[in-house]
């Protein structure tokens, strides 16, 4: 395995084509669906991943989140850590090269 | 832990038991010919899909038999997508055409799981009793060509277990994203053919080592699941994650089951979507409540601290191998019946002495078994699988 470079604010990620992200009303959360499995996402992971669209940079996602949750404390470190964990699991992949 | 208010998150639609392949390891009921007539119609399937989705079902497997023998899979797939299922077509590849796969893509089918059997034409054709080796390669290319995740399922048995490294290389070469190396589970036809199919412990260990070497090489590029054969484990599998806990099967004729082989259990009457709403079937029916929770357990399970992890294993395996479904799964080394599993392992060392000819899954054999032909079933098995 190659050791990953850290996620930076200019990176653009998209969801892996093996996954589908979906709001699940019955469970009141976002779920990630993939062959042979599913993951229930907690509130913040769902809010981050639903903004991972293959177009917006990490910076754009952060701006968007700040607008949606103006009262939240600074979230940059948490968002980057979450994206790194998601990349580690193969949920998201770089779209900008 | 058992959920107080379980939801059938996984719905398996076994839409037909007809199949062009005759695999010796098939888990389908050996008397499947009884269920090939009277299949549910398209509208009945759509109603079942709607009901299950309203109850929280999310993952949908469309399986069989060979589901592509039905000509309404396109319609079911499109309906499943509209309802918000994540859907998976589980196929041998026979009957998949460019036209059909394009229609599946349009309808929103999420992935296709293709069965492969070996790197050699000989073993592929032998174990399936068909000439399908070249076809499977073509279908794999078609799946890739339509930008589907490539999910390969390879059932592992004595005839291909020594080829695991080469099978994984083949999977990598055709661009697989997921590979499931599914060691045969001994139900249905596989149980009848157990003495022919079961690998030795040494073969199994080598296969696991080869798999781990390959994992280290490919990393995240290809996910490999190695389903351990439970006979060689010390504790039973958490079968279905517990009876009536997350899993529900609607079968070809509308009978609803908590697991693939539940029909083998004596004294249970399984409800049918033609007669009752799925909600009642899941929540209220005696069959779905029979082994829910742990109230049914006997010793050693009842007082076992691990009962919340493995739920006492598999009720069907307990019945087929010990004669009583409430017994601990005999795979468990704490089971007083573990010797029946050890004997099967012992017999795997001398297959030439023990094995009878393979009983392939076909209509003729199924008819004989449905009529109770015990001579095709090894004497140590309680009841027909």
Image (spheres, rainbow, N blue to C red):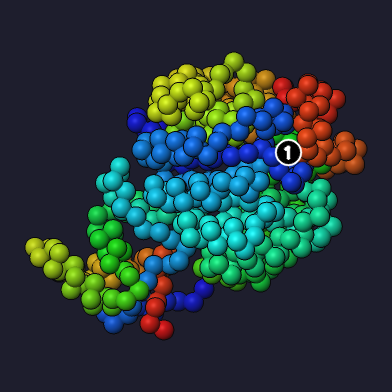
Looking at the image, which residue sits at the far left?
Answer: A71
Residue A45, given in percent of the width and then of the height, sits at 28, 59
For the point 34% across and 55% down, the residue is A22
Dividing the picture into quadrants, the one containing residue A61 is bottom left
* In-image side of B76 versus B171 (left or right): left
- For disc 1, the marked residue is B190
* In-image side of B289 versus A64 (left or right): right
Residue A96, given in percent of the width and then of the height, sits at 38, 82
- Which residue is at the front of the view, B323 or A41? A41
Tag 1's secondary structure?
helix
* In-image side of A30 versus B262 (left or right): left
For the point 34% across and 31% down, the residue is B5
Q: Is residue B255 visible?
A: yes
Q: Is the residue B350 above or below the residue B383 in the image?
A: below
What is the quadrant of the N terminus of chain B in the image?
Answer: top left
Chain under disc 1:
B
Looking at the image, which residue sits at the far right?
Answer: B353
Residue B146, given in percent of the width and then of the height, sits at 55, 67
Q: Is residue B316 visible?
A: no
What is the quadrant of the C terminus of chain B in the image?
Answer: top right
- Which residue is at the front of the view, A63 or B130? B130
All told, the count of numbered labels is 1
For the point 81% across and 32% down, the residue is B365
Looking at the image, which residue sits at the far top?
Answer: B267
Q: Is the residue A69 above or below the residue B348 in the image?
A: below
Dividing the picture into quadrants, the one containing residue B328 is top right
Q: Is the residue B281 above or below the residue A5 in the image?
A: above
């Amino acid at each position: 395995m190659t050791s990953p470079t850290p996620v930076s604010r200019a990176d653009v990620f998209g969801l892996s084509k093996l996954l589908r992200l979906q709001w699940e009303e019955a469970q009141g959360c976002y779920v990630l669906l993939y062959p042979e499995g599913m993951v229930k996402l907690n509130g913040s992971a769902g809010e981050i991943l639903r903004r991972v669209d293959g177009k917006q940079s990490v910076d754009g996602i952060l701006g968007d989140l700040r607008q949606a949750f103006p009262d939240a404390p600074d979230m940059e470190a948490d968002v980057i850590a979450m994206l790194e964990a998601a990349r580690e699991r193969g949920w998201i992949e770089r779209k900008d090269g | 832990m058992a959920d107080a208010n379980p939801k059938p998150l996984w719905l398996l639609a076994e839409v037909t038991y007809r199949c062009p392949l005759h695999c010796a390891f098939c888990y389908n009921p050996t008397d499947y010919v009884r269920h090939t007539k009277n299949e549910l119609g398209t509208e009945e399937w759509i109603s079942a899909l709607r009901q299950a989705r309203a109850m929280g079902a999310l993952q949908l497997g469309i399986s069989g038999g060979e589901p592509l023998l039905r000509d309404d899979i396109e319609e079911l797939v499109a309906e499943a997508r509209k309802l918000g299922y994540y859907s998976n077509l589980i196929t041998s590849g026979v009957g998949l055409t460019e036209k059909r796969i394009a229609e599946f893509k349009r309808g929103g089918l999420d992935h296709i799981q293709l069965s492969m059997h070996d790197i050699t034409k000989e073993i592929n054709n032998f174990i399936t009793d068909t000439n399908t080796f070249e076809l499977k390669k073509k279908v794999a290319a078609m799946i890739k060509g339509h930008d589907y995740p490539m999910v390969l399922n390879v059932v592992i048995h004595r005839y291909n277990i020594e080829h695991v490294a080469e099978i994984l290389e083949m999977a990598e070469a055709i661009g697989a994203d997921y590979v499931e190396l599914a060691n045969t589970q001994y139900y249905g036809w596989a149980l009848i053919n157990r003495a022919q199919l079961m690998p030795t412990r040494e073969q199994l260990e080598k296969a696991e080592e080869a798999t781990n070497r390959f994992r280290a090489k490919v990393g995240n590029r290809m996910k490999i699941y190695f389903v351990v054969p439970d006979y060689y484990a010390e504790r039973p599998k958490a079968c279905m994650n517990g009876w009536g806990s997350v899993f529900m099967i609607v079968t070809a004729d509308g009978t609803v089951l908590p697991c693939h082989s539940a029909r083998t259990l004596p004294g249970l009457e399984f409800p049918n979507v033609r007669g009752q709403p799925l909600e009642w079937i899941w929540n209220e029916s005696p069959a779905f409540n029979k082994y829910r929770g742990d109230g049914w357990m006997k010793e050693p399970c009842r007082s076992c601290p691990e009962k919340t992890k493995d739920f006492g294993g598999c009720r069907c395996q307990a019945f087929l191998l010990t004669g009583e479904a409430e017994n601990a799964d005999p795979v468990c080394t704490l089971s007083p019946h573990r010797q029946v599993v050890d004997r099967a392992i012992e017999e795997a060392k001398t297959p030439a002495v023990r094995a009878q000819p393979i009983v392939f899954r076909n209509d003729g054999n199924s008819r004989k078994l449905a009529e109770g032909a015990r001579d095709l079933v090894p004497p140590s098995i309680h009841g027909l699988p």
